[in-house]
Image (tube, coloured by chain):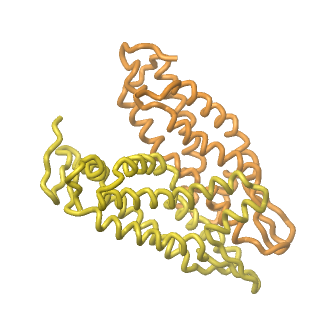
Chain colours: A yellow, B orange
Amino acid sequence: MARPTLAYGQVAECARCGYELLRLRHRFVGPGLALVLAALLLYFPANFLPIMQLNLLGRVTDDTVWTGVLSLYRSDMQGIAFVVLLCSMVVPLLKLLCQFVVLLCIATRRAKSLGMLLYRTYHHLREWGMLEVYLLGILVSIIKLRDIAELSLGIGLACFAGLLVVQVWLELVMSPQQVWEALAEPVDARR
Amino acid sequence: MRRPNSIVRTWALLLSAALLYLPANLLPIMTVRMLGDGTPDTIMSGVVTLARHGMYPIAAVVFVASILVPTFKLIGIAMLLISVQRHHPMSAHQRLLVFRFIEWIGRWSMLDIFVIAILVAIVNFGSLASVEAGTGAVAFASVVVLTMLAAITFDPRLIWDNTESGNKHD
C-alpha cells in the first residue's frame, strides 16, 4: 500500500476503522521544546514535594516519590527500591532528556546521528517509564489509607498529574514519522 | 535482523518468572502493624480486603493488574512459544493479538509494587502504626520484570513463522 502524501495539518486515517495513520503538523519543534521544558520544570516538584500527608493522632508523615524509594531501601528491600526508582524516576527523566536533545538536534540541524541514537534509545525506554501506573498506585493508596487516618493531598500530586499530562501531550506532538524524517533529512528540517 | 536465540532466551525468562509466581502469590507482600499487631497481606488478601470494604471498582482494578495480568502473561507467552515451535494451530492473527495485548498490558502489574512503596513511606508512625514490605513483594516484582523482559526478548517476526508450512525452529 502506498504511503499517502499529506499537506501540513492533514491527517491520514484508515478508511475502515478510522485509526490515525499519519499526521503532518505545521510545527512540532517549537511546541515540543516548550512541552519538554515544562515537563522538566514539573519533574522535580513532582518527585520531591509531598504527594499526600497522613495525620495519625497528631503525628504527621508525608510521602513523596523519592521517600517511597528511600523507605524501601532502608527496610532492606533494595531490589524493589531499585525497580521503583527506575520506573518512576530515572526512566521518565531519561526519556525527557532524550526528547529534549532530539528536538535540539532538529532545531539546530546539528549532530543528527546523536539525535537518531537518542531517539532510538527513547523508544527502548518507553515501556519502562510508568508514571501513569504510579498515578493509579497513588489512587489505590488513597483509598486504602482513607479509613486508617486523616489524609490530605499535597502539591506534589498536582505536579505529578501535570507532569503526566504534559508527557502524554508531548508524545502526541512528536509524531515518530515526522521526527525520523526531520532527523534523516539533511537540509529541510521542519520547524 | 532477527534477535538471536529468541525462543530459548524467552523460555529461560518465562520459566524463571513461573518459578517465582508461586511465592509471589503465597508469601505476604506487606505487613501492616497497628500497635504491635501485624497482619500480613498477600496479593489476594489485599484484593479481598478492598472488596469487603465495598470498594468494588478499585478491587477489580487491583485484581486485574496483580492477578489476571501476570497469569495471562505467563500462559500467553508460553502459548506463543509452543505454537511457534510445534506448529500449533494458531493463526498469525491470533498470535499477533496475544502478543500485542501482552506487550501493552504488562507494565500495569507494577501497580501493587508502587502501592507498597507509597504505603511503606507514609505509614511510618513507629510502634503506633507501620507498613513493612514482605518477601512476596520481591518475588512479585521479579515476576513482573521477568515477564516484561520475556515479552521484549520474544521476536515478533516469529509470529509469522510456522503458521502453515514454514520452517521448524528450536
From the viewer's perspective, tell me whether residue A172 is left or right of residue A120.
left
Q: Is residue A152 above or below residue B152?
A: below
Instruction: Measuring from the top left, give residue A164's x and y in whole percent.
Output: 45, 66
From the viewer's perspective, tell me whether residue A20 is left or right of residue B16.
left
Q: Which of A135 and A37 lies nearest the eye of the viewer?
A: A37
Query: Which residue: 69% across, 34% down?
Result: B19
Query: Which residue: 71% across, 49% down?
Result: B138
Single out the residue that lies furthest toward the front. Answer: A110
Instruction: Measuring from the top left, give residue A7's x and y in whole percent.
Output: 12, 55
Query: Which residue: 59% across, 55% down?
Result: A86
Residue A143, by quadrant, is bottom right
Instruction: Measuring from the top left, give residue A174's x and y in whole percent.
Output: 32, 57
Single out the residue that lies furthest toward the bottom. Answer: A58
From the viewer's perspective, tell me whether residue B164 is left or right of residue A145.
left
Query: Which residue: 49% across, 60% down?
Result: A132
Q: Is residue A100 above or below residue A42?
A: above
Q: Which of B150 and B59 lies nearest the eye of the viewer?
A: B150
Q: How many marks?
A: 0
Is residue A187 among the parts visible in the rendering? Answer: yes
Instruction: Measuring from the top left, give residue A24's x and y in whole percent.
Output: 20, 55
Q: Which of A182 and B128 lies nearest the eye of the viewer?
A: A182
